[in-house]
Amino acid sequence: MTRKFSLFFALISVVIASCSKESGEQAANREYVSAAGDVSKAALLFDNAEYSEALSLCKKAVEKVGKIVEEHPESSVAFKIITDPKIRIGACEYAVLRDYAIPEMEKIANPRAKSVELAWAYACSSRNFVKLAEALFRTNPHSSETIEIAEECAKYSDNKSDAREIYGMISRAKNSSLEKSAPKKEAGTKIPSGPSIKSDDLIKRTERAVNLIVFDINSIDELGELCRSAKVSDAKTSEKFGELLDKAAKNIERISVPSLRIQAAEKLALVFAEFGEETKALAVSSQIPDSPEKSKFLIKMIGEIAKKQNFDEALEITKILKRDLDKYSAYGKTARFAKEYGDEKTIKKI
C-alpha cells in the first residue's frame, strides 16, 4: 500500500512539474507576443508623428522582454533571446530596437525641441541640423527658445564643421541681443580701472591678504579688488604687487585641504588674469584637476581675459580645452568682446 501511495505522489509530482513547465513556457510566449504588439503600435504612432508615445511603447516592450529572461529563464523564448542576435520582435530585430531604434527615438522625442517637433524629426533623420538652425534664426533670432533648440542642433550634429557653424549662429544671436541691451562703445575703448589707493596702503593690504591665504582663502577676494588699483599705480608699485602675487601662488601650495586648495587656485588664477599675467594664471590653474568643473573655470577665465581685449591670449588658452563644446563656448565669449570692441581681426580668426 505504501509503495502504491509513493508511486501515486511521484506521478502527481511529474504532472505538476509538467504543468508548471508548460505554464512558464506559455507565460513567456504571451509576454513576447505582447511586447511585439507594443512595437507594432509604436510603429503606427511614429508614422503619425507621436514620437514620445512611440518611444514609451518601445521601452515598455524592452522591459517585457527583460522580464521574460528574468522570470522564465527556462523557456525556449528566453533561450532564443539570449542566444539569437537576430531574433525579431514585431517588424524589426530585437537588438536593432534596443541598441539603435530607441536611442534614435530618444533623440527625436527631445523635449527641448517639442515646439518644432516635425522639423526636429526631419533634421534627426537627415542628419542636417544646420538647415533647422538657420530656419530658427531667420524666424525668431533673439528668442531664448531658438538658442536652446540651436544648442541641441549643435549637440547632436555628427559633423564638427556643422556644429561650429551652428555655434557661430548662436554666438552672433547672443551678441546681437547684447548690442540691443547695452550702450555702444567705440572701438578700442578700455575697461575702466579700479579706484586708486595710495601705494604704501596698497602694498600693506596686499601683503596682509597674501599672508592670510593659508588660513583664509577668502583673502584672495581682497587681492582681486586691490589688483584693479595696482594696474593704475606707478611701475614700482605694480611690480611689487606682481611679486606678492607670486608669493600668493606659493602659499596656495601650503593649504592642506585639497578642496580648499582647488578653490584658492581658481580665485588666484582669475586675479592673475585680471592683472594681465595670463601665463601665470594658466600655471596656477594647473593645480585644478581635469574635470568638467575645470573646463567651466577655464571658460570663465578666458572670458575675463577677452574682456580686457587680450584676444590672442584668450584664443591661445582656448586650445587647451579638450571638448569641442567647451571650445565653442570659449570662442563665443571671445567673439562677444571682440565684436563689442570692433576687433574684426579677432572675429575672423574665430
Image (tube, helix red, strand yellow):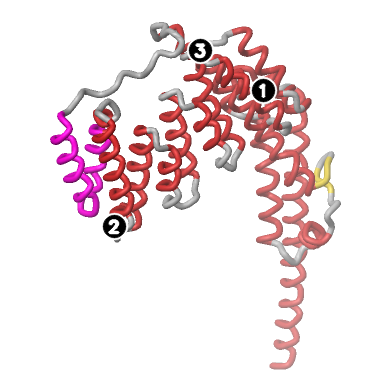
Q: Who's the residue at 20% across and 50% down the image?
A: 211
Residue 219 left/right relative to 43:
left
On whether residue 210 falls in the magenta region, the answer is yes
User: On the image, numbered disc 2 is attached to which residue?
Assistant: 255
Badge 2: few (under 14), some or many (20 or more) residues near its Cα, within 10 Å?
Answer: some
The amino acid pointed to by label 3 is Gly
Q: How many marks?
A: 3
Lower sequence index among marks 1 and 2: 1
The amino acid pointed to by label 1 is Glu
The quadrant holding residue 7 is bottom right
Percent x, y for residue 219? Answer: 22, 43
Name, please, the residue furthest toward the front.
236
**Which quadrant of the figure contains the C terminus?**
top right
The amino acid pointed to by label 2 is Ile
Label at residue 222: none
Percent x, y for residue 97? Answer: 76, 43
The quadrant holding residue 232 is top left
Where disc 3 sits, the SS reads: loop
On whether residue 81 falls in the magenta region, the answer is no
* Mark 1–mark 3 distance (CA, rounded to whole Å): 21 Å
Observer able to see residue 326: no
Q: Who's the residue at 78% across and 49% down the image?
A: 95
Where disc 2 sits, the SS reads: loop
The quadrant holding residue 70 is bottom right
User: On the image, numbered disc 3 is attached to which residue?
Assistant: 342
User: On the image, numbered disc 1 is attached to which residue?
Assistant: 165
Lower sequence index among marks 1 and 3: 1
The magenta segment is 198-226
Q: Who's the residue at 50% across and 50% down the image?
A: 290
* Mark 3–mark 2 distance (CA, rounded to whole Å): 43 Å
Q: Name the mark nearer the viewer: 1 or 3.
A: 3
